[in-house]
Amino acid sequence: MPTFGWQDSESPHAQFIRGVDWSATAIGAPETWPQQLHQMIDLILLDPTPSAIMWGDSLTMVYNDGFVEFAGEKHPKLMGGTPMVSYAEVWEAQFAPIIKLGREEGKATRHKDVPLFLKRHGYLEEVFVDYTFIPLTGNNKEVVGFYHTAVETTDQNLARRRTQTLIDIGNHAGIARDMRQYWDAVLKGFENNIWDVPYAIAYEFHNDKERDSESYNGSENRSNSRTRSNRSASFSESVSSSGRITIPRACSLAGVIGKPMTHVPLILNVSIEEEGFHQVVKKAISSGEPVRLEIAHEKTPEWLKSNAQGRAFEEPIRHAVVMPIRPTTRNDTEGLNAIGFVVIGLNPRRSYDDDYQRYTRLWSQQLATSAASVVLLEQENKRQMRLKAQLSINETRFSRFAEMSNVAMWIVNPSGVLIYGNQSWYEQMDVTEGAPGEKGLPAWADCVSDDTRPTLVDAWKSLTGDQIATNFEIRLNPTRATKQSRWVLSSAFPELAEDGSLKAIWGCNTDISHQKLAEELKEQRLLDVLEAKRQSESFIDTVSHEMRNPLSAILQCADGVNTSIMEARQSSEDPDHTDIDREGLDYIVESTQTIILCAQHQKRIINVCILTIPPCHLIPLFEMPLFLQFVLDFAV
């Protein structure tokens, strides 16, 4: 039957264990070991969990291959050594009480996510471990050793802590409404992670108008707290007319945590062509990716080399990262749209491994995303402020126009109560402000004359019931100022609320009294013309009658005289003499008198016509003194 003990195994780690000079250790050569120790070594070699055996009073260690990675640089010296020496940095505070409890009370110990600081890779490293210590008893029931497992949970705990920082950045930046609040939110997002972000220094780019010629130090000195520079300029103020910011050259301090403000310059000029810090900043801005900075570099500024107070174990910072903040990268390969950058120190007890780099990129992306939202919101707020200011100007202009206009403007609510009336309206109406309407009519209904009141009632029904605009003419009663009635043309329309209900009624009254007077004059003139025409026609009929009858009499008499003379001439034998009898002569005389009378009558009619027809100026008339008796005698 095959055997699988550690002394027969061909695995590299089993061979390594056999190659240790155990005789030089506290437990001696393997030949002297008790069978229980051999069995426990076989157990840990088969155990996939990183595990070890601590045997004897000196706790001599034997561990499996999985424990090698956890031991780090302590391997291979740890094999056969004692943890009291190899883990001296944490033994007394962390493990000595556990061993004492196991020896004295025989109790096992298990802890999860225990933070430890182990020197495994040349520096004191922050790690998290789930470990167990199980006492091992011998034949006499005394504790002869411990079975120990150690599962490292560093990655999970660091991921949890760094993810929380990512969440904090998003939460704080999500409530920022302008760039000043944004920079405060950035610092708040990093503030709670005192291990992975020993310090954070935020700088904001500004345009040439805001650039100072040299940096200066502030008077405020607050360590381990958020310190905000009052020189932060708004991103939207540095945007050019084309919508893109100018090339970032000078920048001002936007805030700092983990360092006194007196140790940090408030103004930087990153356009300097210099290796080290300035070169790293320009590379981060142009690439849009976080770039690591070697603190030990000779060109690194001294203010980045100082320790973080109260953060990150207060140990010297070996590395920092410059994280650019670019709200948008579209059509921007040189970082022209960058609004600033953040310099964060790195955890001195962790290496800048892939996970650390991944989270700095995520932080940088979150900063950029939040900045884009804030920039858009700030621009929208400024647009709203401009619109509000323009609206205020327009309202002022309209109010001034309404007060100076001779058009009466008014606003009433659906009940007819006056909301607004300009000066012209009050001059036109005789109504007190806020007076209620009459039976649902507008407040100025009493000013309308009775004959046009039905027109107002119909128009009000269209406005309030049908909710349609309407124009109507009404006549106003005389007021104390006018003393006479006036006509107005009213144009009104309903104002509806969002739910479709009637909110108010707007209208304006135009005085059309002069137009109405002109229409009345025109109508009266037309009536006068028609009357003149009627009178003219009647006059012509009368004159025609007065002239036609005498003319008929004249024609008849002349015809009778002509007939009598012709008959007398025909009956006379002497061609040179005509005999007319007495009766004929009487007829002729009578006819001639009739002709004379009719002719005189027509003459008088003609004289009257000449005096009464329109072109009477054709007859010259003169005033002259006359004796009344003479005129009467002449008339008779």
Image (spheres, rainbow, N blue to C red):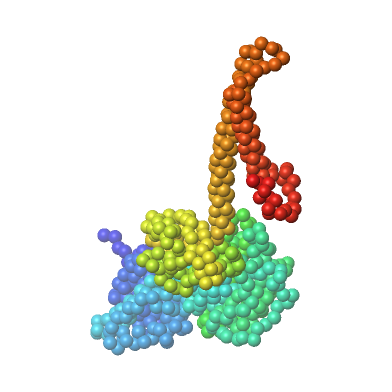
In the rendered view, tell whether residue 532 sits above or below residue 345.
above
- Going by the picture, which residue comes out furthest to the left? 140
The spot of residue 209 in percent (x, y) is: 71, 70
Residue drawn at point x = 55 percent, y = 46 percent: 531
In the rendered view, tell whether residue 8 sits above or below residue 607.
below
Would residue 306 be seen by someone viewing this image from the given angle? yes
305 relative to 425 in the view: left or right: right
Say which quarter of the image contains residue 315. bottom right
Q: Nearer the viewer, residue 470 or 274?
A: 470
Residue drawn at point x = 38 percent, y = 71 percent: 151
Q: Nearer the viewer, residue 182 or 381?
A: 381
- Going by the picture, which residue comes out furthest to the front? 582
Quarter of the figure with the N terminus? bottom left
- Going by the picture, which residue comes out furthest to the top? 573
The spot of residue 238 in percent (x, y) is: 65, 66
The spot of residue 36 in percent (x, y) is: 29, 76
Say which quarter of the image contains residue 601. top right
Residue drawn at point x = 37 percent, y = 65 percent: 440
In the rendered view, tell whether residue 235 sits above or below residue 542.
below
473 relative to 553 in the view: left or right: left
Would residue 76 be seen by someone viewing this image from the given angle? no
The spot of residue 588 in percent (x, y) is: 62, 26
Q: Nearer the viewer, residue 576 or 300?
A: 576
Residue drawn at point x = 55 percent, y = 68 percent: 482
Q: Nearer the viewer, residue 147 or 441?
A: 441
How many numbered badges does the structure rendering display?
0
